Image: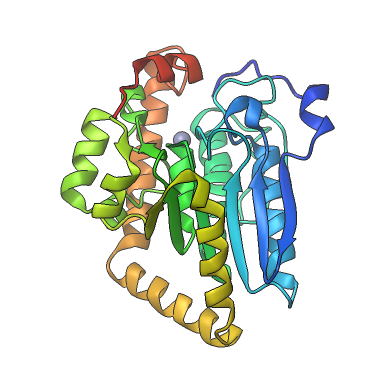
Amino acid sequence: MTDHEPATMPAEETAEPVVRYERRGSAALVTLNRPRYRNAQNSVMTYALDDAFERAVNDNDVRVIVLAGAGDHFSAGHDIGTPGRDVHVPYDRKAVIWWDHTDKAGADARYAREMEVYLGMCRRWREMPKPSIAMVHGACIAGGLMLAWVCDLIIASDDAFFADPVVRMGIPGVEYFAHPWVLGPRFAKEALFTGDRFTAQRAYELGMVNRVVPRSELAETTFAMADKIATMPPFGLSLVKRAVNQCEDLMGMRPGMDSTFGLHHVAHAHNAETGADSLAGMDARSMKSASQAP
Ligand code: ZN
Protein backbone atom coordinates (compact mmCIF):
# COMPACT_ATOMS: atom_id res chain seq x y z
CA MET A 1 0.00 0.00 0.00
CA THR A 2 1.22 3.46 -0.79
CA ASP A 3 0.52 6.88 0.68
CA HIS A 4 -1.14 8.44 -2.34
CA GLU A 5 -4.44 6.64 -2.63
CA PRO A 6 -7.64 8.46 -3.57
CA ALA A 7 -9.89 8.96 -0.55
CA THR A 8 -13.11 8.79 -2.56
CA MET A 9 -14.51 6.16 -4.90
CA PRO A 10 -14.64 7.00 -8.62
CA ALA A 11 -18.15 7.15 -10.08
CA GLU A 12 -17.60 3.97 -12.10
CA GLU A 13 -17.11 2.08 -8.85
CA THR A 14 -20.38 3.20 -7.32
CA ALA A 15 -22.70 2.64 -10.32
CA GLU A 16 -22.82 -1.16 -9.92
CA PRO A 17 -22.87 -3.06 -6.64
CA VAL A 18 -19.42 -4.56 -6.11
CA VAL A 19 -21.08 -7.67 -4.69
CA ARG A 20 -24.35 -9.10 -6.01
CA TYR A 21 -26.77 -11.11 -3.90
CA GLU A 22 -29.35 -13.49 -5.36
CA ARG A 23 -31.39 -16.47 -4.27
CA ARG A 24 -31.18 -19.74 -6.25
CA GLY A 25 -33.59 -22.18 -4.61
CA SER A 26 -32.24 -22.95 -1.16
CA ALA A 27 -28.90 -21.32 -1.93
CA ALA A 28 -27.75 -17.72 -1.73
CA LEU A 29 -25.54 -16.79 -4.64
CA VAL A 30 -23.00 -14.12 -3.68
CA THR A 31 -21.09 -12.77 -6.67
CA LEU A 32 -17.92 -10.67 -6.68
CA ASN A 33 -18.74 -7.96 -9.16
CA ARG A 34 -15.80 -5.90 -10.36
CA PRO A 35 -15.29 -7.84 -13.61
CA ARG A 36 -13.48 -4.95 -15.25
CA TYR A 37 -10.72 -5.41 -12.67
CA ARG A 38 -10.93 -9.22 -12.56
CA ASN A 39 -12.78 -8.88 -9.25
CA ALA A 40 -9.84 -7.32 -7.46
CA GLN A 41 -10.84 -6.98 -3.82
CA ASN A 42 -10.90 -3.49 -2.36
CA SER A 43 -12.27 -2.74 1.09
CA VAL A 44 -15.67 -1.68 -0.20
CA MET A 45 -15.96 -5.16 -1.72
CA THR A 46 -14.80 -6.79 1.50
CA TYR A 47 -17.52 -5.09 3.50
CA ALA A 48 -20.15 -5.70 0.82
CA LEU A 49 -19.17 -9.36 0.91
CA ASP A 50 -19.51 -9.38 4.68
CA ASP A 51 -22.99 -7.82 4.40
CA ALA A 52 -24.03 -10.42 1.81
CA PHE A 53 -22.82 -13.30 3.96
CA GLU A 54 -24.57 -11.86 7.01
CA ARG A 55 -27.79 -11.59 5.01
CA ALA A 56 -27.49 -15.22 3.92
CA VAL A 57 -26.77 -16.40 7.47
CA ASN A 58 -29.80 -14.54 8.81
CA ASP A 59 -32.21 -15.81 6.14
CA ASN A 60 -33.73 -19.05 7.43
CA ASP A 61 -34.60 -20.14 3.90
CA VAL A 62 -30.95 -20.04 2.82
CA ARG A 63 -29.28 -23.37 3.51
CA VAL A 64 -26.07 -23.06 1.49
CA ILE A 65 -24.01 -20.06 0.40
CA VAL A 66 -22.35 -20.06 -3.04
CA LEU A 67 -19.55 -17.60 -3.78
CA ALA A 68 -18.77 -16.80 -7.43
CA GLY A 69 -17.04 -14.20 -9.56
CA ALA A 70 -18.64 -12.15 -12.37
CA GLY A 71 -16.93 -11.98 -15.74
CA ASP A 72 -14.03 -14.09 -16.91
CA HIS A 73 -12.35 -14.71 -13.55
CA PHE A 74 -13.12 -15.57 -9.94
CA SER A 75 -10.67 -13.05 -8.46
CA ALA A 76 -7.24 -11.69 -9.33
CA GLY A 77 -6.61 -10.98 -5.64
CA HIS A 78 -6.43 -7.90 -3.48
CA ASP A 79 -6.74 -4.55 -5.16
CA ILE A 80 -3.19 -3.27 -5.55
CA GLY A 81 -3.74 -0.68 -8.23
CA THR A 82 -7.23 -0.05 -9.67
CA PRO A 83 -8.83 3.42 -9.54
CA GLY A 84 -11.08 2.14 -6.76
CA ARG A 85 -8.32 1.06 -4.46
CA ASP A 86 -9.36 2.31 -1.04
CA VAL A 87 -6.58 1.52 1.41
CA HIS A 88 -6.88 4.84 3.22
CA VAL A 89 -10.66 4.83 3.59
CA PRO A 90 -12.15 4.02 7.01
CA TYR A 91 -14.77 1.27 7.28
CA ASP A 92 -16.80 -0.24 10.09
CA ARG A 93 -14.56 -2.64 11.91
CA LYS A 94 -16.43 -5.89 12.46
CA ALA A 95 -13.96 -8.74 12.21
CA VAL A 96 -11.56 -7.89 15.03
CA ILE A 97 -11.33 -5.42 17.90
CA TRP A 98 -8.67 -3.05 16.70
CA TRP A 99 -8.39 0.68 16.10
CA ASP A 100 -8.98 2.51 12.84
CA HIS A 101 -5.90 2.30 10.63
CA THR A 102 -6.45 5.54 8.72
CA ASP A 103 -5.02 7.90 11.35
CA LYS A 104 -2.02 5.67 12.05
CA ALA A 105 1.34 5.35 10.31
CA GLY A 106 3.70 2.60 9.18
CA ALA A 107 3.30 -0.91 10.53
CA ASP A 108 0.69 0.30 13.01
CA ALA A 109 -1.61 1.23 10.11
CA ARG A 110 -0.85 -1.82 7.98
CA TYR A 111 -1.25 -4.29 10.80
CA ALA A 112 -4.58 -2.78 11.91
CA ARG A 113 -5.96 -2.76 8.37
CA GLU A 114 -4.83 -6.24 7.38
CA MET A 115 -5.88 -7.77 10.69
CA GLU A 116 -9.38 -6.48 9.98
CA VAL A 117 -10.03 -6.74 6.24
CA TYR A 118 -7.81 -9.71 5.37
CA LEU A 119 -7.12 -12.13 8.21
CA GLY A 120 -10.05 -11.10 10.40
CA MET A 121 -12.68 -11.10 7.68
CA CYS A 122 -11.50 -14.39 6.23
CA ARG A 123 -11.70 -16.07 9.63
CA ARG A 124 -15.14 -14.55 10.20
CA TRP A 125 -16.38 -15.97 6.89
CA ARG A 126 -14.83 -19.38 7.44
CA GLU A 127 -16.86 -19.61 10.63
CA MET A 128 -20.25 -18.84 9.11
CA PRO A 129 -22.68 -21.46 10.47
CA LYS A 130 -23.94 -22.46 7.01
CA PRO A 131 -22.10 -24.51 4.41
CA SER A 132 -20.39 -22.46 1.71
CA ILE A 133 -19.20 -23.42 -1.75
CA ALA A 134 -16.70 -21.47 -3.86
CA MET A 135 -17.61 -21.76 -7.55
CA VAL A 136 -14.30 -20.93 -9.21
CA HIS A 137 -13.50 -20.19 -12.84
CA GLY A 138 -10.59 -18.42 -14.51
CA ALA A 139 -8.03 -16.73 -12.28
CA CYS A 140 -7.98 -17.36 -8.56
CA ILE A 141 -4.84 -15.58 -7.51
CA ALA A 142 -3.39 -14.61 -4.09
CA GLY A 143 -6.25 -12.84 -2.27
CA GLY A 144 -8.59 -14.83 -4.55
CA LEU A 145 -7.26 -17.99 -2.94
CA MET A 146 -8.20 -16.60 0.46
CA LEU A 147 -11.84 -16.28 -0.57
CA ALA A 148 -11.95 -19.76 -2.10
CA TRP A 149 -10.17 -21.31 0.90
CA VAL A 150 -12.57 -19.92 3.50
CA CYS A 151 -15.41 -21.74 1.74
CA ASP A 152 -16.15 -25.28 2.89
CA LEU A 153 -16.12 -26.77 -0.60
CA ILE A 154 -14.51 -25.61 -3.83
CA ILE A 155 -15.91 -26.56 -7.21
CA ALA A 156 -13.71 -25.44 -10.09
CA SER A 157 -14.13 -25.34 -13.83
CA ASP A 158 -11.37 -26.93 -15.85
CA ASP A 159 -10.16 -23.49 -16.98
CA ALA A 160 -9.57 -22.32 -13.40
CA PHE A 161 -6.02 -21.63 -12.29
CA PHE A 162 -4.48 -20.77 -8.98
CA ALA A 163 -1.34 -19.05 -7.72
CA ASP A 164 0.09 -17.13 -4.81
CA PRO A 165 2.90 -15.09 -6.37
CA VAL A 166 3.39 -12.54 -3.57
CA VAL A 167 6.86 -13.90 -2.76
CA ARG A 168 7.84 -11.74 -5.75
CA MET A 169 7.17 -8.83 -3.40
CA GLY A 170 9.36 -10.46 -0.78
CA ILE A 171 6.22 -11.34 1.19
CA PRO A 172 5.82 -14.94 2.46
CA GLY A 173 2.35 -15.65 1.08
CA VAL A 174 -1.06 -14.00 1.47
CA GLU A 175 -2.39 -12.98 4.87
CA TYR A 176 -4.69 -15.99 5.33
CA PHE A 177 -1.82 -18.48 5.34
CA ALA A 178 -3.72 -21.75 4.83
CA HIS A 179 -1.22 -23.02 2.25
CA PRO A 180 0.38 -25.86 4.25
CA TRP A 181 -3.03 -27.20 5.28
CA VAL A 182 -4.83 -26.97 1.95
CA LEU A 183 -1.91 -27.78 -0.37
CA GLY A 184 0.28 -29.92 1.87
CA PRO A 185 3.67 -28.57 2.98
CA ARG A 186 5.63 -29.93 -0.02
CA PHE A 187 3.51 -28.42 -2.77
CA ALA A 188 2.86 -25.28 -0.68
CA LYS A 189 6.60 -24.63 -0.81
CA GLU A 190 6.76 -25.23 -4.56
CA ALA A 191 3.79 -22.94 -5.23
CA LEU A 192 5.25 -20.21 -3.01
CA PHE A 193 8.89 -20.59 -4.06
CA THR A 194 8.01 -20.36 -7.77
CA GLY A 195 4.84 -18.27 -7.71
CA ASP A 196 3.73 -20.41 -10.65
CA ARG A 197 0.14 -21.01 -11.55
CA PHE A 198 -1.33 -24.44 -10.99
CA THR A 199 -4.32 -25.91 -12.74
CA ALA A 200 -7.70 -26.96 -11.38
CA GLN A 201 -6.74 -30.57 -12.08
CA ARG A 202 -3.56 -30.21 -10.01
CA ALA A 203 -5.58 -28.55 -7.23
CA TYR A 204 -7.96 -31.51 -7.34
CA GLU A 205 -5.10 -34.01 -7.07
CA LEU A 206 -3.80 -32.10 -4.04
CA GLY A 207 -7.22 -32.22 -2.37
CA MET A 208 -7.61 -28.45 -2.55
CA VAL A 209 -10.79 -28.61 -4.65
CA ASN A 210 -13.71 -31.04 -4.49
CA ARG A 211 -14.69 -31.26 -8.16
CA VAL A 212 -13.33 -30.15 -11.52
CA VAL A 213 -15.95 -29.84 -14.25
CA PRO A 214 -16.21 -28.29 -17.72
CA ARG A 215 -16.96 -24.59 -17.56
CA SER A 216 -20.41 -25.17 -19.09
CA GLU A 217 -21.30 -27.46 -16.17
CA LEU A 218 -19.88 -25.37 -13.35
CA ALA A 219 -23.08 -23.71 -12.14
CA GLU A 220 -25.20 -26.83 -12.61
CA THR A 221 -22.75 -28.98 -10.62
CA THR A 222 -22.40 -26.38 -7.87
CA PHE A 223 -26.12 -25.85 -7.36
CA ALA A 224 -26.81 -29.59 -7.52
CA MET A 225 -24.30 -29.99 -4.68
CA ALA A 226 -25.95 -27.11 -2.80
CA ASP A 227 -29.38 -28.72 -3.23
CA LYS A 228 -28.10 -32.04 -1.94
CA ILE A 229 -26.50 -30.43 1.12
CA ALA A 230 -29.70 -28.43 1.71
CA THR A 231 -31.61 -31.63 2.49
CA MET A 232 -29.54 -32.11 5.65
CA PRO A 233 -30.68 -30.56 8.96
CA PRO A 234 -29.26 -27.01 9.24
CA PHE A 235 -28.18 -27.32 12.86
CA GLY A 236 -26.43 -30.61 12.12
CA LEU A 237 -24.61 -28.97 9.21
CA SER A 238 -23.52 -26.07 11.41
CA LEU A 239 -22.21 -28.50 14.02
CA VAL A 240 -20.31 -30.71 11.61
CA LYS A 241 -18.82 -27.68 9.89
CA ARG A 242 -17.62 -26.44 13.25
CA ALA A 243 -16.32 -29.90 14.12
CA VAL A 244 -14.14 -30.07 11.00
CA ASN A 245 -12.96 -26.46 11.44
CA GLN A 246 -12.06 -27.11 15.07
CA CYS A 247 -10.08 -30.19 14.09
CA GLU A 248 -8.32 -28.25 11.35
CA ASP A 249 -7.37 -25.67 13.97
CA LEU A 250 -6.16 -28.44 16.27
CA MET A 251 -3.94 -29.46 13.34
CA GLY A 252 -2.32 -26.09 13.85
CA MET A 253 -3.97 -23.93 11.24
CA ARG A 254 -5.12 -21.09 13.46
CA PRO A 255 -1.92 -20.65 15.51
CA GLY A 256 0.09 -21.26 12.33
CA MET A 257 -1.69 -18.35 10.68
CA ASP A 258 -1.17 -16.15 13.72
CA SER A 259 2.57 -16.77 13.62
CA THR A 260 2.89 -16.32 9.86
CA PHE A 261 0.86 -13.10 9.97
CA GLY A 262 3.77 -11.66 11.96
CA LEU A 263 6.24 -12.76 9.28
CA HIS A 264 3.97 -11.27 6.62
CA HIS A 265 4.15 -7.92 8.40
CA VAL A 266 7.90 -8.11 8.90
CA ALA A 267 8.06 -8.34 5.09
CA HIS A 268 5.72 -5.38 4.55
CA ALA A 269 7.76 -3.33 7.03
CA HIS A 270 11.06 -4.36 5.44
CA ASN A 271 9.76 -3.33 2.01
CA ALA A 272 8.55 0.01 3.32
CA GLU A 273 11.82 0.62 5.13
CA THR A 274 14.13 -0.29 2.26
CA GLY A 275 12.15 0.44 -0.92
CA ALA A 276 9.34 2.32 -2.55
CA ASP A 277 6.47 0.95 -0.48
CA SER A 278 5.25 -2.06 1.51
CA LEU A 279 4.60 -4.01 -1.73
CA ALA A 280 8.20 -3.64 -2.94
CA GLY A 281 7.02 -1.16 -5.56
CA MET A 282 4.95 -3.78 -7.37
CA ASP A 283 1.42 -3.32 -8.66
CA ALA A 284 -1.12 -5.48 -10.48
CA ARG A 285 0.55 -4.88 -13.84
CA SER A 286 4.07 -5.78 -12.77
CA MET A 287 2.82 -8.80 -10.82
CA LYS A 288 0.86 -10.04 -13.83
CA SER A 289 3.75 -9.59 -16.25
CA ALA A 290 6.03 -11.55 -13.91
CA SER A 291 3.66 -14.51 -13.55
CA GLN A 292 4.02 -17.69 -15.58
CA ALA A 293 1.35 -19.71 -17.33
CA PRO A 294 0.72 -23.21 -15.95
ZN1 ZN B 1 -0.37 -7.83 3.50
Q: Position of residue 100 (x, y in %)?
A: 67, 42
Q: Residue at x 41, y 29 (%)?
A: 268
Q: Residue at x 58, y 40 (%)?
A: 113
Of residue 103 and residue 218, the one placed in the foreground of this image is 218
Up-down relation of residue 213 to residue 70 (above or below)? below
Of residue 33 and residue 283, the one placed in the foreground of this image is 33
Is 49 situated left or right of 176 in this image? right
Quarter of the image holding residue 131?
bottom right
Is residue 47 in view from this perspective?
yes
Q: Residue at x 52, y 87 (%)?
A: 236
Of residue 263 and residue 228, the one placed in the foreground of this image is 228
Q: Position of residue 37 (x, y in %)?
A: 61, 26
Q: Residue at x 72, y 19 (%)?
A: 6
Up-down relation of residue 84 to residue 246 (above or below)? above
Of residue 136 and residue 99, the one placed in the foreground of this image is 136
Is 261 situated left or right of 205 in this image? right
Is 267 situated left or right of 26 in this image? left
Looking at the rendered structure, the number of numbered marks drawn on it comes to: 0
